[in-house]
């Protein structure tokens, strides 16, 4: 069972101090948060992808590579990588590079995001969002598993004899989660490929998330990847912790009331009762999180949103101290009790290497081995004199 925190990378006015941090301050803060997450014993840190104000994380691989250089054990991930508006070739390249730099300490979550205008910004049509997600991942999946790819899809120019570089570390692709809060086709996609399924699990009751997760598990078994119990499930959630409940409610209320996503909406107490939001003492957060297991059964990853709505960095770091000292150790112990032996652990690079190679040494692709014709394949020069007798044809 993995525990971690994720950030949506918002730059939001602090309703208590009245100050709005700069992008530079928020970027620096997220790096501090990731380092602190490792220091207090968490397993995973994830960052979202956005291309519009008030968010700053337009290049998650750059940020995660920087964090990888400053950490030793922390697994790095995304929440979300946009599979619709990013070219799958670019995703294959960037995340394989991150995989190498992080020495395998990474995975990623693919999704469509929640910002409609991002589609025309990248030359895409939002009406094709779902087919884009399906088509693009089909190509990404192949790029990481086939040295030479010929591809003719519906949303990009064809590929002829293309090799994505660098090849995945140990020739084992990064583990992929598919994230969705409402779309059964995405759960179906995760199940078809035997990948993980992640539920945001923030804005709606757990029963809402359960429908998609149950569907994913059934389809995972249908496609022959294992039993329903062996499907890989991750959950989000959000928490605000103080030593006692009254202080937690008092401190978090102004941030909740002014939060861009639900501010000026429901009362915080109603939102806490109706959704996975947990505001209270360490024990209250533990108790609320343990109800997730009662609802969903055993699962592999629990992530908490604690960095949003203008919360100052100092407060977020204090939240991590409380999580690491009082909450996560108890959750680890309680989640381990009576855990079904059929439930697998969350995949790691090491476990994926063992699954693929057993006791054999992993394959290490070489720069000029098993490569396609990236220079002339499908190019305007394919039948020109440049193909032979020049550097382009070598």
Image (cartoon, rainbow, N blue to C red):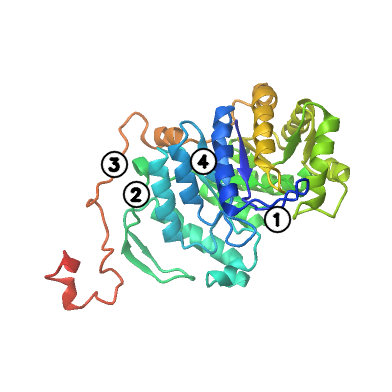
Which of marks 1 and 2 precedes in the sequence? 2
Look at mark 4 in the image and give the residue it sits on.
Answer: 76
Q: In this view, does 78 lie above or below 227?
A: below
Residue at left 24%, top 74%?
382
Place of residue 37 in the rendered image (x, y in percent of width and height, measured from the top left): 58, 33
The CA distance from mark 2 to mark 1 is 33 Å
Place of residue 301 in the rendered image (x, y in percent of width and height, measured from the top left): 61, 36
SS label for mark 4: strand
Residue at left 83%, top 32%?
247
SS label for mark 1: loop
Q: Is residue 114 above or below residue 179?
A: below
Whether residue 172 appears in this view of the structure is no
SS label for mark 2: loop
Look at mark 1 in the image and give the residue it sits on.
Answer: 182
Nearer the observer, 183 or 324 = 324
Which of marks 2 and 3 precedes in the sequence? 2
Crowd rating for badge 1 (residues with CA inside 10 Å; few <14, some 14–19, many 20+): some
The CA distance from mark 4 to mark 3 is 23 Å
Residue at left 77%, top 49%?
15
Residue 375, picture quadrant: bottom left
Marks 3/2 in contact by CB < 8 Å: the verdict is no
Horizontal placement of 76 versus 114: left or right?
A: left
Look at mark 3 in the image and give the residue it sits on.
Answer: 364
Whether residue 77 appears in this view of the structure is yes
Which of marks 4 and 1 precedes in the sequence? 4
Place of residue 181 in the rendered image (x, y in percent of width and height, measured from the top left): 69, 52
Which of marks 4 and 2 precedes in the sequence? 4
| Mark sitting on residue 167 | 2
């Amino acid at each position: 069972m993995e525990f971690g925190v994720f950030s949506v990378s918002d730059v939001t006015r602090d309703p208590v101090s009245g100050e709005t941090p700069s992008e530079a301050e928020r970027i620096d803060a997220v790096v501090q948060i990731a380092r602190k997450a490792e220091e207090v014993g968490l397993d995973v840190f994830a960052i979202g992808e956005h291309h519009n104000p008030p968010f700053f994380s337009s290049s998650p691989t750059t940020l995660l590579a920087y964090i990888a250089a400053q950490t030793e054990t922390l697994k790095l991930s995304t929440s979300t990588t946009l599979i619709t508006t990013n070219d799958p070739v670019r995703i294959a390249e960037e995340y394989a590079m991150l995989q190498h730099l992080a020495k395998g300490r990474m995975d990623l979550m693919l999704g469509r995001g929640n910002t409609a205008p991002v589609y025309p910004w990248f030359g895409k049509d939002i009406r094709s969002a779902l087919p884009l997600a399906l088509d693009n991942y089909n190509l990404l999946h192949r790029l990481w598993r086939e040295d030479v790819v010929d591809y003719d899809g519906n949303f990009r120019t064809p590929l002829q004899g293309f090799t994505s570089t660098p090849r995945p570390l140990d020739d084992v692709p990064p583990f992929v989660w598919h994230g969705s809060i409402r779309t059964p086709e995405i759960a179906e996609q995760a199940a078809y490929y035997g990948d993980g399924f992640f539920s945001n699990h923030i804005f709606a009751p757990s029963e809402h998330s359960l429908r998609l997760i149950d569907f994913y598990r059934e389809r995972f078994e249908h496609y022959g990847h294992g039993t329903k119990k062996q499907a890989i499930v991750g959950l989000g959630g959000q928490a605000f912790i103080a030593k006692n409940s009254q202080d937690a409610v008092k401190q978090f209320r102004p941030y909740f009331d002014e939060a861009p996503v639900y501010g000026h909406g429901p009362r915080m107490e109603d939102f806490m009762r109706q959704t996975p939001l947990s505001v209270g003492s360490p024990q209250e957060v533990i108790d609320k999180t343990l109800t997730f297991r009662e609802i969903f059964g055993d699962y592999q990853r629990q992530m908490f949103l604690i960095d949003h709505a203008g919360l100052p960095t100092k407060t977020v770091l204090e939240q991590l101290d409380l999580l690491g000292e009082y909450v996560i150790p108890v959750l680890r112990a309680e989640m381990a009790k009576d855990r079904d032996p059929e439930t697998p652990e969350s995949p790691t690079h090491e476990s994926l290497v063992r699954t693929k190679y057993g006791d054999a040494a992993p394959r290490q692709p070489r720069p000029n081995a098993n490569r396609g014709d990236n220079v002339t394949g499908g190019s305007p020069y394919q039948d020109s004199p440049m193909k032979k007798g020049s550097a382009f044809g070598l």
